[in-house]
Amino acid sequence: MDEYEKLLKKAQDELPKDKLNKERFILPKFSSHIEGNKTVLKNIDEVSKKIRRNADHLIKFMASELASQGIKSGTFCTFIGKFPNSLVNKKLEKYITMFVLCPSCKKPDTTIIKIERISFIKCEACGARNPIR
Ligand SMILES: [Zn+2]
């Protein structure tokens, strides 16, 4: 196989997979604004619904990542401190990688199950069960 063929094959191998993943799951984003010395996440319910996780679990994670405290009121969640939108969404991406995407097939169709105090990500797409780090 010459270089050109190798490149072509590589391109073919990589292309469809990437495309498929992107089409399947669009990462939800927080919409947020800073109010005085607080940061308001305006769509915490919507985001947690989209990733099928408990809003309180997500808030707890955000609070520990931001070294802050989250106070939920209605569909809003307020954190003490000024956090730019890019930062809160970076944390959200981290949450999704840790708790939502299947480590085996990277699909988001998962649930969290607990077996003897250990939490697992159970994947509905491929059936894998991976412990949460
Ligand atoms: Zn899977």
Image: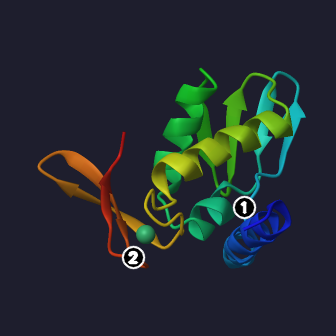
Measuring from the top left, give residue 107's x and y in whole percent. Answer: 53, 69
Depth check, mark 1 against mark 2: the one in front is 2
Q: Amino acid at mark 2?
A: Cys
Query: Residue 126 shows which numbered tag?
Result: 2
Q: Position of residue 114 (x, y in %)?
A: 22, 55
Q: Residue furthest left?
A: 116
The numbered disc on residue 28 is: 1
Position of the N terminus by quadrant: bottom right
Which residue is more in the foreground, 22 or 94? 22
Q: Is residue 9 left or right of residue 108?
A: right
Residue 36 drawn at (x, y percent):
88, 24
Report how far apart the C-alphas of labels 1 and 2 lie in the structure. Answer: 22 Å
Q: Quadrant of residue 50?
A: bottom right
Residue 131's place in the image compared with 15, above or below, is: above
Q: How many callouts does the rendering have?
A: 2
Left or right: 83 in relation to 58:
right
Q: Nearer the viewer, residue 89 or 9?
A: 9
Element at badge 2?
loop
Q: Tell me if the residue at label 2 has its CB under 8 Å from ligand 1.
A: yes
